[in-house]
Image (tube, rainbow, N blue to C red):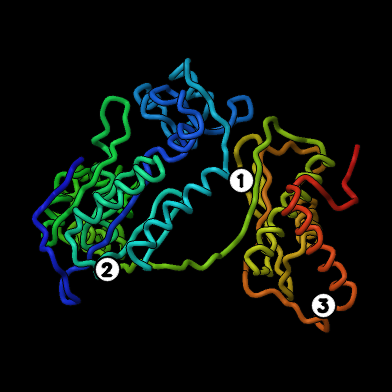
Amino acid sequence: MQVAVGLPLRYNKSMPRKILHLDLDAFFCAVEELHDPSLHGKAFAVGGRPEERGVVASCSYAARRFGVRSALPMSRALRLCPGLLVISHHHGNYGEMSVKVMQRLHDLSPLVEQISIDEAFVDISDLHEAPATIARRLQQRVNDELGLPCSVGVATNKLVAKIATEVGKKTAKKDQPPNAVTVVPPSTEAAFLEPLSANMLWGVGPKTAARLAEYGIKTIGDLARRPEADLIRWFGENGRDLARRTCGVDNSPVTTEHEVKSISQETTFARDVRDDKLLANTLRDLSAEVGRRLRQANIAGTTVKIKLRWPDFTTLTRQVTMSQPTDQDEEIYRLALDLLGKVRAKGKAVRLIGVGVSGLGAPLRQLELWGADSEKSRRLQEALDTVRAKFGEQSIRRGKRIHK
């Protein structure tokens, strides 16, 4: 456990914020180990099957010794680690455990910003205890009550708190999760960041890092020592943001709600598909899933989009916008199928296909706007949703599936 100490015991509104960042260590793998303790200490990965072009979603720390990492093609992971065990996703388990973790964060403060299934910020500025004490107690709860390892970073802002977590996670040893706590005291942000790699800063991706390296800039400290004018000349207004971040300045608030901009679903085929009927049926299934998620969130959208990827990895999107919003499977499917017909030549191979809906807002519900037929269709859709919720997604389908 790594802890930087020296924080005052009590805060008030005029004092710096206290932002906690929690990241579950190898979350999917940790959940799998709870369900199958025999996996503990073994090299394994959670993700798709290699013969189905699967990728690594998460890997154990034992597997990381061989160079296995997230987002790596599973076939490549098996070449790096021939004895690697491949575990299929158990999505329901992950979601259930994530909810339990987030409940414990909400026990600390209502100001919780969840940024992924296994990661969140919490504003603990109103708590009077020392941040290190709060962080250790939270970590202990997650460890003891849920059996999940987690790393925690605390600082005066989100940027430094997240980087603190990343620094702590690098302390993992002997094939074990780091389970680290790292606290950066107020007024030490710049000193903490100074020796770290420049690519740990928000806004420094691979291309930006490569360009910085051309100027001899490798660390955040190197970047901080360059005049802001240089950064603006190189990167425009983004350079001004970079200059602030190098000093550990970040005023972004912990946001408890995020606006959903689109809902989409896609699939990558195990083998390239040329069959028109199979593509149409896949499009219908994807449209049904998008429609279900829209209705579940009580929203509808005016723009339907499809995404296609050819065997050479060329990816394109096409969309159409309607005058009225929809959350209905059949309407989404009809528009998506029409877009597919316009962009794809008959028999052309497809590697990936997806459907999405954007332009989201409240769904129309008034009978006079929908008309009797539309209202009848909506009631049928609600009945289908009820059956699927009780008996599973595959328990019932609409008719008119395209068969060979």
Q: Quadrant of residue 230?
A: bottom left
Q: Earlier in the sequence, mark 2 or mark 1?
A: 2
> Is residue 158 at least partly visible in the picture?
yes
> Closer to the camera: disc 2 or disc 1?
2
What label does residue 222 carry, if any? Answer: none
Kindly identify which residue carries mark 2: 251
* Left or right placement of residue 337 versus residue 292 in this view: right
User: Looking at the picture, how far across and down is residue 12, in whole percent?
Assistant: 17, 74
Q: Quadrant of residue 291?
A: bottom right
Q: Residue furthest bottom?
A: 368
User: How much space separates mark 1 and mark 3, taking CA atoms?
Assistant: 36 Å
Kindly identify which residue carries mark 1: 315
The residue under the point 90% across, 40% down is 403
Assign a secondary structure to mark 1: strand
Kindly identify which residue carries mark 3: 370
Q: Earlier in the sequence, mark 2 or mark 3?
A: 2
Three-letter amino acid code at disc 2? Asn
The residue under the point 30% across, 48% down is 139
Q: Residues within 10 Å of mark 1 (few under 14, many from 20)?
A: few
Q: Residues within 10 Å of mark 3 (few under 14, many from 20)?
A: some
Q: Residues within 10 Å of mark 2 (few under 14, many from 20)?
A: few
Three-letter amino acid code at disc 1? Thr
Three-letter amino acid code at disc 3? Trp
Q: Is residue 97 above or below residue 335?
A: above
Assign a secondary structure to mark 3: helix
Q: Pick whichever, 29 or 162, lies toward us.
A: 29
